Image (tube, rainbow, N blue to C red):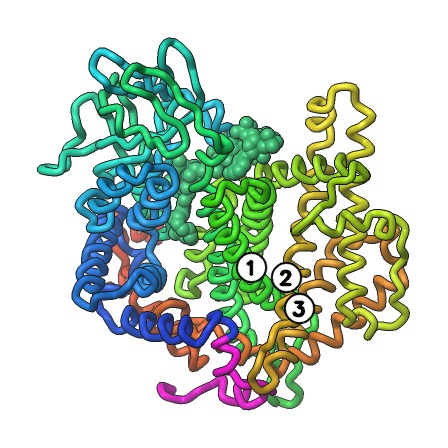
Amino acid sequence: MEGIDHLADERNKAEFDVEDMKIVWAGSRHAFEVSDRIARLVASDPVFEKSNRARLSRKELFKSTLRKCAHAFKRIIELRLNEEEAGRLRHFIDQPAYVDLHWGMFVPAIKGQGTEEQQKKWLSLANKMQIIGCYAQTELGHGSNVQGLETTATFDPKTDEFVIHTPTQTASKWWPGGLGKVSTHAVVYARLITNGKDYGIHGFIVQLRSLEDHSPLPNITVGDIGTKMGNGAYNSMDNGFLMFDHVRIPRDQMLMRLSKVTREGEYVPSDVPKQLVYGTMVYVRQTIVADASNALSRAVCIATRYSAVRRQFGAHNGGIETQVIDYKTQQNRLFPLLASAYAFRFVGEWLKWLYTDVTERLAASDFATLPEAHACTAGLKSLTTTATADGIEECRKLCGGHGYLWCSGLPELFAVYVPACTYEGDNVVLQLQVARFLMKTVAQLGSGKVPVGTTAYMGRAAHLLQCRSGVQKAEDWLNPDAVLEAFEARALRMAVTCAKNLSKFENQEQGFQELLADLVEAAIAHCQLIVVSKFIAKLEQDIGGKGVKKQLNNLCYIYALYLLHKHLGDFLSTNCITPKQASLANDQLRSLYTQVRPNAVALVDAFNYTDHYLNSVLGRYDGNVYPKLFEEAWKDPLNDSVVPDGYHEYLRPVLKQQLRTARL
Ligand SMILES: CC/C=C\C/C=C\C/C=C\C/C=C\C/C=C\CCCC(=O)SCCNC(=O)CCNC(=O)[C@H](O)C(C)(C)COP(=O)(O)OP(=O)(O)OC[C@H]1O[C@@H](n2cnc3c(N)ncnc32)[C@H](O)[C@@H]1OP(=O)(O)O
Ligand SMILES: Cc1cc2nc3c(=O)[nH]c(=O)nc-3n(C[C@H](O)[C@H](O)[C@H](O)COP(=O)(O)OP(=O)(O)OC[C@H]3O[C@@H](n4cnc5c(N)ncnc54)[C@H](O)[C@@H]3O)c2cc1C
């Protein structure tokens, strides 16, 4: 039934103004208008069609990706799109591609680590895409352990060049996106050696392919590392391998903003922290947090609309069955994910602010907040990507059998998204960075150094280590102070327990290794506190629009109380709350689900996703699921013929028992 809105009843139930919520979700009216215009532009352009992606071979998929990128670049120039609009265009095209790494890592690495002169030279080429670059850090043998990278860049004072070399097989670059088949250049991370001394990891701009015929330059071996998980999915990206056999580059292709090598080969360390060489990773981790809310909201939009369309059981005498969204179990699985999508949106906004702030401070030689920015970007990247990957899979299950179909949009979304738990830092490795930061902060308590920013709560240790929650009735769990106190006390007590256990070891590093699992849990508790507190802070802002704040309030407390329920063991074992208070939190959670229920479809409409972007039969705006499932089924190549290929060779002989006869 084309043209009918099967979800109209759901939309009519909404108790808030969806258009106003769209602005809150987008971040501003301007951001909404840009996103809306660009999403429609992409949806109406046949080159950006993506519904057949799973049926393409790897080669066809890759070629179609090149076509989409070229067409996008052409449209950016024709329509004179600015940087923000171009970014939205790439986002809505929704196909992982070399351009993500070119704009997302290669250009930022040069901006962050190149001198002014280097930026002038390389960015003018990169911005016009006269060169295409990637970020070549990870090696076959080392990804997490950046200090363990083996590629060498040895200065040769005779020729004023660096010699880039891959000394072993494990030193081969392995994974960089865009490297396999496209990039003409790379920022290569290698050990800088001059005058026989190893100065550790530095970045170098290296040309890989000819700008004339795209063939690899002499002594460079490069290719694609092979097919990755899922049909279509991330296979549009050419993750690559790369080996150098004594490849020479001019000295001025070492990125020298942070440290330098002189003509004579003298290493001049910078007066800024050496960790700034990791600056690109801090930047990208921040963007990945913002992206988590995109991916999760997309899955939640599909699962929510479908849960309102789908009916099972409850019919008496042939009457209408129950919408599955009305089952409390469905709500208990779906609504916390809806709340998480909003929570990650707001923490992403805050993290962007933090990143801008630290960047401005660094420019003014103020390095004080760098460790916190590193801990926040690392921890929140880990927390949000883990929850999003798990959440997408939960949404698939929430859609029952049909969720397993490619055309539900969820299998591909999962396969594209799940490597976010690994790239830009394995999620456990990143939480251990947070744990180290927390252990340092705890060790300094009482030293006179007052913790600030996201660890400010630790400065109230005297209260938080002994307080008991004052919650007496379910509604008390809607008090921001009660929620914050419980999360702060839990996080602090877990960190302090780890610190106490660490102090029992003579060798601190040995102790750290022994306590890794507890340390990760303490780090997660701290990161969850950040997300909860930033959601609460968002509610304190001036948010207009009919009924909008009320909905956000409900979602905020669903997020917090769902975490409390999920990690009840932590809250109880640290004596932050009693079993009775935990039970009251659950009562409140159920009541919040009831309040969200009539607004659920409108809350996902507020994401303003086009059907093109969602690419999901189950998540269609009009809810017209069943006829469209049939349409998709008929499109499958297996249905091209009534009798399948192979019938005469392999089916007929079985059915006619010719195989058995032949054997007898
Ligand atoms: C389709 C795409 C969809 C979505 C993406 C959306 C948006 C993204 C936009 C653009 C990107 C485009 C596409 C994305 C797709 C894929 C991109 C993937 C790219 C990559 O994966 S690049 C490779 C990334 N690699 C890693 O992340 C490696 C992880 N390891 C590390 O970061 C570090 O080595 C470490 C953190 C594990 C540190 O190890 P260590 O303790 O041994 O440390 P060091 O001795 O090196 O350092 C000690 C000291 O330094 C501090 N530190 C460490 N890191 C940092 C940092 N980044 N900033 C500041 N400080 C840092 C550390 O805390 C120690 O401090 P201390 O005071 O001495 O204790
Ligand atoms: C899709 C994709 C795209 C990528 N794109 C790029 C790119 O563009 N450029 C680039 O340079 N790289 C890229 N990478 C590489 C990526 O950054 C690394 O894979 C990532 O940093 C993890 O490192 P690893 O593979 O060495 O994992 P490993 O460190 O080998 O992890 C294996 C296991 O060991 C555990 N582990 C490791 N160290 C510790 C520790 N100290 N304590 C406890 N547990 C530990 C981990 O938790 C994990 O369970 C990409 C990877 C993927 C999957």
Residue pictured at 56% horizontal, 59% vertical: 350
Quarter of the picture containing the C terminus is top left
Say if residue 604 shows up in the picture: yes
Residue pictured at 22% horizontal, 68% vertical: 46
Q: Which one is in front, 653 or 413?
A: 413
625 to the left or right of 178: right
Distance CA(mark 1)–CA(mark 3):
15 Å
Q: Earlier in the sequence, mark 2 or mark 1?
A: 1
Residue pictured at 82% horizontal, 33% vertical: 500
Most distant residue in the top direction: 196
Report the mark closest to the observer, 3 or 2.
Answer: 2
Decide: is 70 above or below 254: below
**Neighbourhood count class around disc 1 (C-alpha, 10 Å): few under 14, some 14–19, many 20 upward:** some
Say if residue 660 shows up in the picture: no
Q: Which mark is residue 556?
A: 3
Mark 1 — residue? 350
**Neighbourhood count class around disc 3 (C-alpha, 10 Å): few under 14, some 14–19, many 20 upward:** many
Question: Which element type, helix, strand or loop, lies under badge 3?
Answer: helix
Amino acid marked by disc 1: Trp
Residue 524 pos. (x, y %):
67, 47
Q: Which mark is residue 534?
A: 2
Q: Earlier in the sequence, mark 3 or mark 2?
A: 2
What's drawn in magenta, residue-wise? 1-23
Amino acid marked by disc 2: Lys
Q: Is residue 222 magenta?
A: no
Q: Which one is in front, 621 or 377?
A: 377
383 to the left or right of 136: right
Residue 174 pos. (x, y %):
37, 31
Amino acid marked by disc 3: Cys
Question: Which element type, helix, strand or loop, lies under badge 1?
Answer: helix
